[in-house]
Image (cartoon, helix red, strand yellow):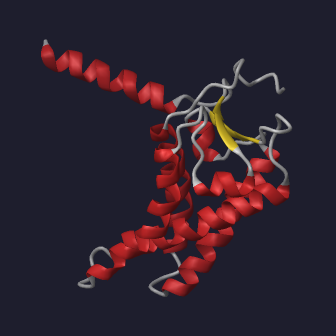
Amino acid sequence: MSSDLVPLLPKVTIGRRAAAFCIDGFAVWLPSLLLGTNPIAQIIFFVLLWLIMRVAIVRKNRGQSLGRWAVDIKIVDPRLDRTPGLQELSKREALLGGCAALAFVALGGLTSTNAGVVLLMLPLAIDCSVAFTDTARFPQAFHDRISGTIVVGTRRGYSLDIKVKRLLDQVQSNVRR
């Protein structure tokens, strides 16, 4: 087992996973918006950047993308107790990246008069809802089950979620005074 894993592989909450996903998603979505109003070009660029950030970088960075590093989590292949291989990461992120691309297109289309763009968020919701109903120690979303990976906590990262929580606690205590 890797030395930076906390003993017994700590469970990660769905909220921390969602925070990491949002950080990675916005880091990829914002550059794809620079391509203008062509949604097909934006989707293709989004998926390419997504695969670079969530496969190539994760492979080199011991299971962590930018978002996962920010909230101290990583991807692990539980059978081998190490970072998943290129094939597992590619399966996982191709499925999740496609769902994420549709969801971010929906976010960009919320200002339009077509309310049907909200349906583009449905594949991501279905994929992630599997983790909400999973009763195992490590809840797996559909993309985790397909690739055979789990998400665990690690000591390696920035601990952004903890720092934001402390800041909000300080603000709340100052407001009460």
Q: Residue at x 74, y 63 (%)?
A: 91
Choose between 108 and 14: the one closer to the eye.
14
Q: Position of residue 164 (x, y in %)?
A: 40, 30
Q: Quadrant of residue 32?
A: bottom right
Q: Which residue is drawn at 29% across and 18% down?
A: 170
Image height check: is 89 above or below 119? Answer: above
Choose between 144 and 109: the one closer to the eye.
144
Q: Which residue is drawn at 52% across and 47% down?
A: 131
Choose between 71 and 103: the one closer to the eye.
103
Q: In this view, does 68 lie to the left or right of 37?
A: right
Q: In this view, does 71 lie to the left or right of 168?
A: right
Q: Could you tell me which quadrant the N terminus lies in? A: top right
Which residue is outermost to the top?
A: 177
Q: In this view, does 133 lie to the left or right of 96?
A: left
Q: Could you tell me which quadrant the C terminus lies in? A: top left
Q: Where is residue 98 in the image (x, y as percent from the top left)?
A: 59, 70
Q: Residue at x 66, y 23 (%)?
A: 155
Which residue is outermost to the left?
A: 177
- How many numbered circles are shown? 0
Choose between 64 and 13: the one closer to the eye.
13
Q: In which quarter of the image is residue 46?
A: bottom right
Q: In this view, does 141 lie to the left or right of 175?
A: right
Q: Position of residue 81 (x, y in %)?
A: 82, 34
Image height check: is 120 above or below 100? Answer: below
